[in-house]
Image (cartoon, rainbow, N blue to C red):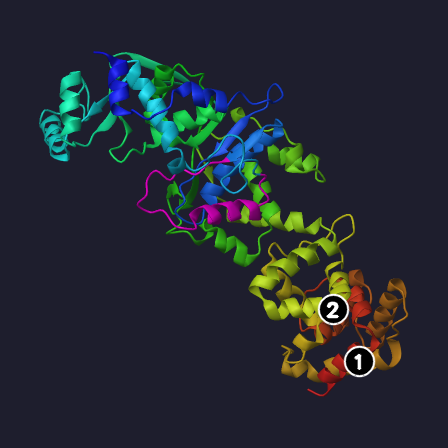
């Protein structure tokens, strides 16, 4: 067989691969810099599993001063959305991923959408034909169904190989006849593998893996001229000079086939890391997190709740490396970017999605921010999800920042909220517009005592210029005057000797001003409310 003649017959207009080898030269990067890519299909919004899968290559690329590529694999056109690329890109940008090259950013190694690289694939397909490692297959769907049925009956390996590879040894004349007849063909790899021999492969996550060698003559180019994933990713990763391929571990079984393709071309292989999906404990079973079954799998769920994007990434970092959490405790003021991630610290059995842990990380993250930073984040979130509250906090911007700053800048800051959606329920009472229709839950038989406490405090003890120590001493004096214990130790020793304790007095004032029994520091709340608003709220209780 004259393979070069066959290659020209199949792909007469395809360029020599040297054209593309020169067009996409080795990258000028520092030694050790990694080139990583996230390569989704544009079928809609990415979910938390995808977001974690993209976090990994982004981290490894940038911690090594390398390059992170967003590449779109759209060769399967069935579920493609017109705005699918934009949706994916915007989701990654929302989480502040640094994308160096993409369909929207451009780059010297594009195009970054596979259907726009058809001419490139033709050149590399032509090359494989020219060296005798690929051939055209004219088998019809009916031929393949009959072959599969025959293999199933005989309980043989399913696929196109060996004596079942009917088109593998077609003559040049046979190919010419098919082409003249207008017969469609797919291009297949001419496999040299032996399934009775072992293929040994080292994975960055799973370690050394042994699998049977590939002997299937897989499809490299479909009849429409578009390649499946296997062929496309080899060509793309070669020309983009990808150094680490991160992908789902469902591809493990295909590794021998993919590696045979790399070897057929003679390309230098990248390193591979096959990633286990994020799982969820569902009763007694552990399953892959599902966008259909699990609301928290959708990014929109986290946006609507207002979970900080940086908290999500900190959570991802704990899933990525088991020793990150301990490092973060020792370095609370550092970014996850300061941590050196490694593949050997990744879970070999898959990570469980733990919403409670994400909430804990989020609370801790928000507690460490300055009040002005929390305001900016709340402002951005509420513009989309609570426009009325957004108008209110911007009407009183400096006041809102002061409210958010209560018990914040101290050694152990409060951790009242994990989400932006939780802030309004925590601070609404600080705004008169929201407090107008407030309802109290005082017990009816206590109303007279409550009014007595408030009247006496308002008339005799309240002074807005008091410092905190003076303020608290007056609360104690008020307690003693009304028959309440001013000392908690004394109250615990002889509770029957008092109506209650100083804590009960404080709580009456707290509920009168906020309707809530639990709030941040009462003195700071009163300091921000000011005399006129406090007296107005006291009168509201007295006039109940």
Q: Are marks 2 and 1 in contact (CB under 8 Å)?
A: no
Q: Is 83 included in the stretch rendered in magenta?
A: yes
Q: Position of residue 101 (x, y in %)?
A: 54, 36
Q: Residue 354's x, y, as percent?
A: 50, 45
| One can see residue 170 in this view | no
Is disc 2 placed on a helix, strand or loop? loop
Query: In front of the other: label 2 or label 1?
Result: 2
Q: Would residue 107 appear left or right of 292 to someone viewing this image?
A: right
Which numbered disc flags the more N-terminal residue, 2 or 1? Answer: 2
Quadrant position of residue 272: top left
Which class describes the residues within 10 Å of circle 2: few (<14), some (14-19), or many (20+)? few
Q: Quadrant of the N terminus?
A: top left
Q: Of 254 and 223, which appears nearest the observer? A: 223
List the residue tagged with mark 1. 535
Can you say whether 150 is above or below 49 in the image?
above
In depth, the one of 250 and 176 nearer the eye is 176
- Residue 73 position by quadrant: top left
The residue identified by callout 2 is 396
Which residue is nearer to you in this view: 316 or 170?
170
Q: Quadrant of the C terminus?
A: bottom right
Residue at x 65%, y 55% (from the top left corner): 377
Q: Residue at x 15, y 16 (%)?
A: 171
Tell me where residue 211 appears, x and y as whole percent: 32, 18
Magenta span = 70-98
Confirm whether residue 278 shows in the render: yes
Q: From mark 2 to mark 1, how far is it between C-alphas?
A: 21 Å
Q: Is residue 170 left or right of residue 496?
A: left
Whether residue 293 appears in magenta in the rendering, the answer is no
| SS under mark 1 | helix
Relative to residue 275, is residue 336 drawn left or right?
Answer: right
Q: Residue at x 65, y 60 (%)?
A: 379
The residue that appears at 55% across and 33% down in the rendered structure is: 68
């Amino acid at each position: 067989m004259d393979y070069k003649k066959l290659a020209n017959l199949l792909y007469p207009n395809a360029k020599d691969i040297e054209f593309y080898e020169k067009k996409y030269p080795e990258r000028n990067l520092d030694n050790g810099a990694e080139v990583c890519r996230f390569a989704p299909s544009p079928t809609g919004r990415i979910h938390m599993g995808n977001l974690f899968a993209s976090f990994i290559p982004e981290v490894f690329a940038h911690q090594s001063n390398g390059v992170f590529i967003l590449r779109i694999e759209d060769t399967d056109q069935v579920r493609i959305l017109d705005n699918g690329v934009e949706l994916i890109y915007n989701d990654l940008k929302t989480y502040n991923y640094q994308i160096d090259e993409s369909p929207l950013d451009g780059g010297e190694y594009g195009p970054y959408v596979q259907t726009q690289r058809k001419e490139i694939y033709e050149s590399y397909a032509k090359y494989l034909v020219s060296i005798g490692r690929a051939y055209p297959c004219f088998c019809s769907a009916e031929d393949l169904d009959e072959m599969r049925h025959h293999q199933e009956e005989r309980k043989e390996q399913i696929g196109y190989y060996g004596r079942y590879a009917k088109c593998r040894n077609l003559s040049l004349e046979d190919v010419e006849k098919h082409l003249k007849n207008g017969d469609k063909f797919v291009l297949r790899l001419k496999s040299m593998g032996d399934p009775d021999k072992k293929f040994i492969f080292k994975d960055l996550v799973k370690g050394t893996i042994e699998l049977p060698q590939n002997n299937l003559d897989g499809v490299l180019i479909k009849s429409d001229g578009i390649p499946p994933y296997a062929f496309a990713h080899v060509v793309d990763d070669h020309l983009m000079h990808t150094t680490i391929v991160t992908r789902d571990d469902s591809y493990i079984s295909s590794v021998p086939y993919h590696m045979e393709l790399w070897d057929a071309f003679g390309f230098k292989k990248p390193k591979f890391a096959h990633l286990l999906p994020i799982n969820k404990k569902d009763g007694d079973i552990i399953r892959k997190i599902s966008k259909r079954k699990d609301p928290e799998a959708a990014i929109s769920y986290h946006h609507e709740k207002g979970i900080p994007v940086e908290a999500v990434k900190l959570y991802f970092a704990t899933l990525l490396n088991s020793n990150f959490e301990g490092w973060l405790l020792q370095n609370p003021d550092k970014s996850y970017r300061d941590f050196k991630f490694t593949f050997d610290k990744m879970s070999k059995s898959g990570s469980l999605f733990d919403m409670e842990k994400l909430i804990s990380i989020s609370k801790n993250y928000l507690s460490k921010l300055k009040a002005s930073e929390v305001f900016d984040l709340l402002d951005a979130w509420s513009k989309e999800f609570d426009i009325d509250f957004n108008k209110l906090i911007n009407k009183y911007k400096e006041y809102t920042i002061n409210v958010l700053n209560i018990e914040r800048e101290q050694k152990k800051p409060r951790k009242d909220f994990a989400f932006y959606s939780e802030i309004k329920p925590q601070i609404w009472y600080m705004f008169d517009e929201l407090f107008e229709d407030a309802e109290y839950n005082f017990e009816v038989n206590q109303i007279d005592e409550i009014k007595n406490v408030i009247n006496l405090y308002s008339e005799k003890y309240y002074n807005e210029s008091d410092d905190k120590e003076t303020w608290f001493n007056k609360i104690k004096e008020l307690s003693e005057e009304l028959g309440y214990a001013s000392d908690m130790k004394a109250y615990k020793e002889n509770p029957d000797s008092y109506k209650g304790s100083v804590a009960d007095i404080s709580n009456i004032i707290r509920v009168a001003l906020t309707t809530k029994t639990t709030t941040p520091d009462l003195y700071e709340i009163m300091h921000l409310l000011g005399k006129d608003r406090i007296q107005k709220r006291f009168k509201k209780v007295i006039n109940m």
